[in-house]
Amino acid sequence: MCFRRFHRPRHLSGFTAIELLVAVAIIAALAAIAVPSFTPLLERWRVRQVTEELQSTLYFARSEAIKRSGGITIDASAGWDQGWKVTYIQGNTTTTLQVSSAPVKVGVTLAGGNGKITVDRWGMLMHSGSTTTTALDFTIAPDSSNTASTLHLCVGTGGRIVQKSSC
């Protein structure tokens, strides 16, 4: 009997299963080391996104109040971290103009507020029920204990809105 030896041609080469498994194990180990360092970055992005959305809502409410001669309310009766909406009240009719959903993994609080802000015909913001323009201090913080990512949205009595680390 004649047995032929079959040799793999030299031009066909590839990875063996073991080489592939070693490469995957190395990539998995590097990913496991890198992922925890991304957590603070993701928290800062979430906080910044919610801060900018709230700031946009305040600008929108002010422009609508000036356009409609008042009657605008920003309502967060369930709590600021449950979302908020901008409504226009004319007589007995309430119209919802904008709705913002609850922020994900971010808490929002308003110092000294009851969950409602009214905007007068000149675009000045005040706590609902108040007759004088008040400074507002929103605190936007991640749900974790990382206080370095916390931002404040400061609204002055003149209406200036600024993002800061503290008001």
Image (cartoon, helix red, strand yellow):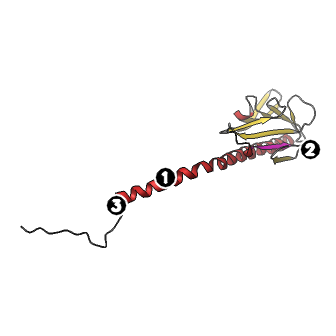
Q: Which residue is mark 3?
A: 16
Span highlighted in magenta in the image: 150-159
What residue is disc 1 on?
Answer: 28
The foreground one among 88 and 12 is 12
Give the amino acid type for the residue marked by disc 1 in the picture.
Answer: Ala
Q: Which residue is denoted by mark 2 in the rendering?
A: 158
The first of marks 1 and 3 along the sequence is 3
**Spot occupied by residue 139 in the image (x, y as percentages of width and height):** 78, 39
Q: Label 2 amino acid?
A: Gly
Q: Residue 2, position in %: x, y?
A: 8, 69
Q: Amino acid at mark 3?
A: Thr
Q: CA distance from mark 2 to mark 1?
A: 54 Å
The residue furthest left is 1
Q: In the rendered view of the protein, which quadrant contains the C terminus?
A: top right
Which mark is in front, 2 or 1?
1
At mark 1, the secondary structure is: helix
Question: What residue is rendered at 89% in x and 40% in y?
Answer: 124
